[in-house]
Image: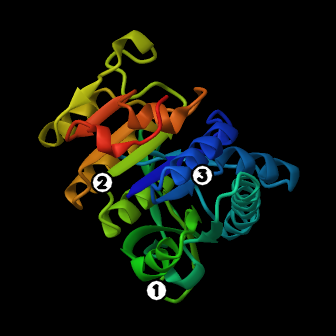
Amino acid sequence: MIVVKAGGNGKVDFEAVCLDVAELVRHGKRGVLVHGGSNEIDLLSERLGHPPRVVTSPSGHAFRHTDRKTLEILLMALGKVNKLLVERLLGLGVKAFGLSGLDGKVLSAKRKATLRTLEGGKVKVLRDEWSGRITGVNSEVLEFLLSRGYVPVVAPIAAGEGGEALNIDGDRAAAAIAAALEAEVLLVLSDVPGVLERFPDPASLIPYIPAAEVGSLEAYAQGRMKRKVLAAAEALAGGVRTVVITSGRTEHPVLEGLAGAGTVIGEPLAEKDYAPSV
């Protein structure tokens, strides 16, 4: 079982991802594709006159402030990305099934109604927040689809305690899904080759680190990479054997990642983890 997270910042090659997923399916591999959509969300937000607002937590994590209007824009944008991915996979002969974590409560979360942010060196509180912390995965829905040969394509929206839609982090959503499905590998596709010791120098790539030392990667993570390292730690703690953080900008991002390109965290990849040759 392989879970692939394809970032949606406009730099990950979704076409190449779909081609690789189709190749894995042809070789009998089962998997889930979790996607982002930040670039599409930003574009739509600007067009609708509600520009995106990115804030920083006191711990240094950057994230989108999701008021109710932003949440509704997010639902539209992620829905578009989801269906375009499903369309492409169907065209490649893959039985793709698109859904969000809201559908069937595939992903449950606890709403963070207020957020503490760091602005100008001061901690402030933001209200009208519609994001959440993942609390559970309804793996039954995903396992039903997988058992019938479908590839679930999941958008990172969760259901709150009252059924309300909540924005959640896509990398951490992928980690939660991978753990719930007892996946062997979580592959996180980014716009850089992996975790870099001297960002942005690609020659400083950290190629491998054991699970017990995943926390040491936080010292090198910059920007969005902080969330990816956090997601990797959560996936490993949940029983995922190997996490790979790698580039989504290559000709074969999924196949190359499964062959060991990027930063491999946890157990080294074995030949059985990937069937096709890159």
Quarter of image, res 228: top left
Nearer the camera: disc 3 or disc 1: 3
Q: Which residue is mark 3?
A: 36
Q: In the structure shown, which secondary structural element does the residue marked by tag 2 occupy? A: loop
**Nearer the N terminus, badge 2 or badge 1?**
1
Q: In the structure shown, which secondary structural element does the residue marked by tag 3 occupy? A: loop
Residue 32 picture location, percent across and down: 49, 60
**Nearer the N terminus, badge 3 or badge 2?**
3
The answer to the question of whether label 2 and label 1 lie on touching residues, with beta carbons closer than 8 A, is no
Q: Do we see residue 190 in this rendering?
A: no
What is the basis of the colouring in this image? rainbow
Q: In the structure shown, which secondary structural element does the residue marked by tag 1 occupy? A: loop
In this image, 122 relative to 126: left or right? left
Three-letter amino acid code of the residue under disc 2: Glu
| Mark 3 to mark 1 CA distance (whole Å) | 23 Å
Residue projecting furthest to the bottom? 162
Three-letter amino acid code of the residue under disc 1: Glu
Above or below for 232 versus 269:
below
**Nearer the N terminus, badge 3 or badge 1?**
3
| Mark 2 to mark 1 CA distance (whole Å) | 30 Å
Q: Which residue is mark 1?
A: 161
Q: Which residue is mark 2?
A: 184
| Mark 3 to mark 2 CA distance (whole Å) | 22 Å
Q: Quadrant of the N terminus?
A: bottom left
The answer to the question of whether label 3 and label 1 lie on touching residues, with beta carbons closer than 8 A, is no
Residue 99 picture location, percent across and down: 62, 71
Of residues 241 and 213, the one nearer the viewer is 241
Three-letter amino acid code of the residue under disc 3: Gly
Nearer the camera: disc 3 or disc 2: 2
Say which residue appears at 46% left-offset and 86% top-offset: 161
Say which residue appears at 60% left-offset and 49% top-offset: 22
Residue 195 picture location, percent across and down: 36, 28
